[in-house]
Image: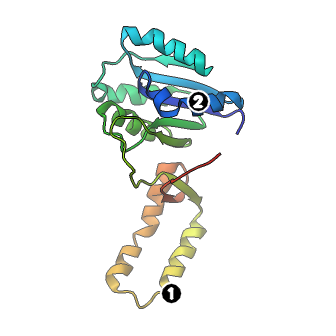
Amino acid sequence: MSGSRVLVLAPHTDDESIGCGGTIRWHDQVGDWVVVQVFSATDEAMDEFKQAMDVLGVLGNVLRYPTRNLHKYRQEILQFLYDLDSPDIVYCPASWDCHQDHQVIHQEAVRAFHNATILGYETTKGSVLPTHLTCYTSLGRHHIDTKMKALACYASQPDRRKLAWKLLPDLARLRGVQSGCQYAEAFEVIRWIR
């Protein structure tokens, strides 16, 4: 994984350190190129952020959107993310984080980066153990055809179930769009140990 381009998205200064400070350091130590992008900061926090980036050994950049108002700048944030060099790995707030600014950054990261690994980090703002689909297996059409042939073996299933099965190729296409491939199946990541 050495040499990966890693982007850490933090709604506010300190979110990156709370959520994945150790991992940021790990990436830096193995030779990955890491940038931390913050979207909201007070004047006082700017110096603290610079110090934190020096400690972590990585580059940091701050945009100065007002705290608790990132939803007003969604399109600007999305365009900013689109304009970045494509990262290999993106860290952002987890989907279940209930802080309004964290939700915006999570959602815009998912919209912007179709060809990158996206991992949601925990913060102290409303994290609970959720069930979310965050791991995708890239599949070809032949995989979906085989899946459908296997399901056809279950002739005893009620017609209402068979009707729902007809939607599975469409769902696989949707999961493919979400993960930047033609077809995919999605899973919840419980643990990924590098």
> x%, y% of residue 26?
64, 32
Residue 88 falls left or right of residue 125: right
Regarding residue 185, the answer to whether it shows in the image is yes
Task: Please tell me how crowded label 1 is: few (under 14), some (14-19), or many (20+) other residues with Cα within 10 Å.
Answer: few
The image quadrant where one finds the N terminus is top right
As measured in the structure, the alpha-carbon distance from the residue carrying label 2 to the one carrying label 1 is: 48 Å
Position above or below: 179 against 47? below
Q: Residue at x 29, y 33 (%)?
A: 100
Q: What residue type is labelled 2?
A: Ile
Regarding residue 58, the answer to whether it shows in the image is no
Q: Name the residue under label 2.
A: 24
Q: Residue at x 44, y 56 (%)?
A: 174
Looking at the rendered structure, the secondary structure element under dot 1 is loop
Position above or below: 41 against 30? above
Q: Nearer the viewer, residue 119 or 73?
A: 119
Position above or below: 130 against 70? below
Q: Which residue is drawn at 39% across and 87% down?
A: 157
Q: Which amino acid does label 1 sit on?
A: Cys
Count of marks, rendered view: 2
The image quadrant where one finds the C terminus is top right
Between discs 2 and 1, the one toward the N terminus:
2
> x%, y% of residue 74?
33, 30
> x%, y% of residue 133?
45, 54
Q: Which of 173 and 157 is in front in this view?
A: 157
Q: Name the residue under label 1.
A: 153
Q: Quadrant of residue 65?
A: top left
Q: Which of 66 and 54 is in front in this view?
A: 54
> x%, y% of residue 30?
71, 32
Q: Quadrant of residue 106?
A: top left
Looking at the rendered structure, the secondary structure element under dot 2 is helix
Q: Which residue is drawn at 35% across and 29% down?
A: 75
